[in-house]
Amino acid sequence: MKVAPGDAQYCSWIRDEFEISTNPARADLQFVHHFLTNSYWAKGVPLETVRLSIQHSVCFGIYHGSQQVGFARVISDRATFAYLADVFVIEFYRGRGLSKWLMECIKDHPHLQGLRRWALITRDAHGLYQRFGFTPLANPDRWMEIHDTGVYQEPRGI
């Protein structure tokens, strides 16, 4: 890992012809929105919601040259808790170990160390996350949620 020149708050990692960067200014908002709004977990998410989510998270973009090919974000207080969300690598770049490398970078990020709890929700990537210590909830009966499945179909006052 190296700290991005000129800005100590952003990190980058380089492997072969790929780079992972936490600089949100590099994130291609249209690219991320296009993927998410067509995903099973954020279908129909408005562009403004994606913009706000990037602004208020620790974001990790995967880049092949200047082209963004993957993304993830962590919502965290940077002291006790982190929620991993919106993890993806576009289909053409899958099978190259990028998602495993992305998870390594996320878990190594200096602002995400010493956290008591990490959480995520996945439909089909349990194997990936288990490699990094994620397990099913030990006490699911203690967790509660509000899950508004129609929120992206309603007008939002931002």
Image (cartoon, grey):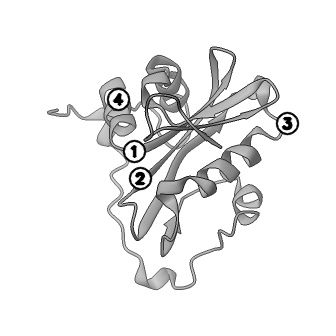
* Image-based side of 56 in relation to 83, left or right: left
Q: In the image, residue 72 lies at what x, y percent? A: 55, 41
Q: Secondary structure at mark 1?
A: loop
- Residue projecting furthest to the right: 95
Tell me the residue that label 3 is attached to: 95
Is the C-beta separation of discs 1 and 2 under 8 Å? yes
Residue type marked 3:
Gly
Q: Residue at x 52, y 85 (%)?
A: 139
- The dot on residue 57 is 1
- The dot on residue 82 is none
Q: CA distance from mark 1 to mark 4?
A: 10 Å
Q: In the image, residue 126 lies at what x, y percent? A: 71, 60
Q: Secondary structure at mark 4?
A: helix
Figure quadrant of residue 99: top right
Tell me the residue that label 2 is attached to: 75
Total numbered labels placed on residues in the image: 4
- The dot on residue 51 is 4
Crowdedness of circle 3 by 10 Å Cα count: few (<14), some, many (20+)?
few
Q: CA distance from mark 1 to mark 2?
A: 5 Å
Residue type marked 2:
Ile
Q: In the image, residue 28 lies at what x, y percent? A: 49, 20
As displayed, is residue 20 above or below residue 66?
below
